[in-house]
Image (cartoon, rainbow, N blue to C red):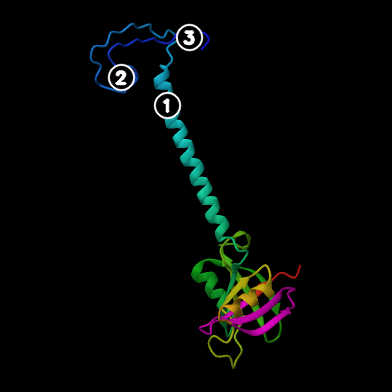
Amino acid sequence: MPGALWSIRRYRGTDFRAACGLDSERRGAKLIDLRFTSGEPSPVEAAKEATASDMNLVKTVIYILVAATMALAQESGIHVRTIRVLAADPEAMATFYEKAFGMSEIRRPVITATFQEIVVNSGSTVDLAKQATTTPIVITTRPKDARAGAMASLILQVPNIDKAIESVKRNGGTVLRPPHKASSGYIVAFVKDPDGNQVELLMTGD
């Protein structure tokens, strides 16, 4: 190495490991020592430090690869879009969630004389609620003759609604309503899981 003089140690009656300080026994050793003048670590010490650093780097890379692989395996393009809550009076129910849980209304996708949908999400203001990454709640008018569970409470957004329906049927579910375009512009279908729970499938109409 330019500008540096490494210690040169010559040992007799011992092996290289002992000469490098890796063996406590140095029987019969005779030493000729030229000190390193630059103040840098010896070659053996530098090698040890490099090895430890390399091992830490390898561990970090392995951790990143494992995390990325797990994330990729979990990504299916399907996610919970909303949770539906039925209410005889959606306005009153929205007020309840706002006051009881600190939520705010973010939109009203459907408003007619007999049917309403009010979407609320976490956030003390409308702006905060719109920016929230949590799953919103859709408060929907409950039909007067509707029994409990008459409407889907779980809404899943899917990348391909036809493939999703085929998967539902292949795994024991049933189709209640085939895909159709809603007034919101989304493609919507209703299915049941094997235990009879309704699930609404939603796909963007793009």
Tell me the element at label 3: loop
Reply yes or no: does residue 111 show up in magenta: no
Residue at the spot of label 3: 4
Q: Nearer the viewer, mark 2 or mark 1?
A: 2
Q: Which residues are magenta?
A: 174-200
Q: Which disc, if any, is residue 198? A: none
Which residue type carries mark 3?
Answer: Ala
> Residue 47 vs residue 84: left or right?
left
Which residue type carries mark 1?
Answer: Glu
Q: Quadrant of the C terminus?
A: bottom right
From this viewpoint, is residue 91 visible? no
Density class for disc 3 (Cα within 10 Å; few <14, some 14-19, many ≥20) is few
Residue at the spot of label 2: 18
Q: Nearer the viewer, mark 2 or mark 3?
A: 2
Residue at the spot of label 1: 49
Q: Is residue 87 above or below residue 37?
A: below
Reply yes or no: does residue 180 show up in magenta: yes
- Residue 75: x and y, percent? 59, 60
- Residue 186: x and y, percent? 72, 73
Which of disc 1 and disc 2 is earlier in sequence? Answer: 2
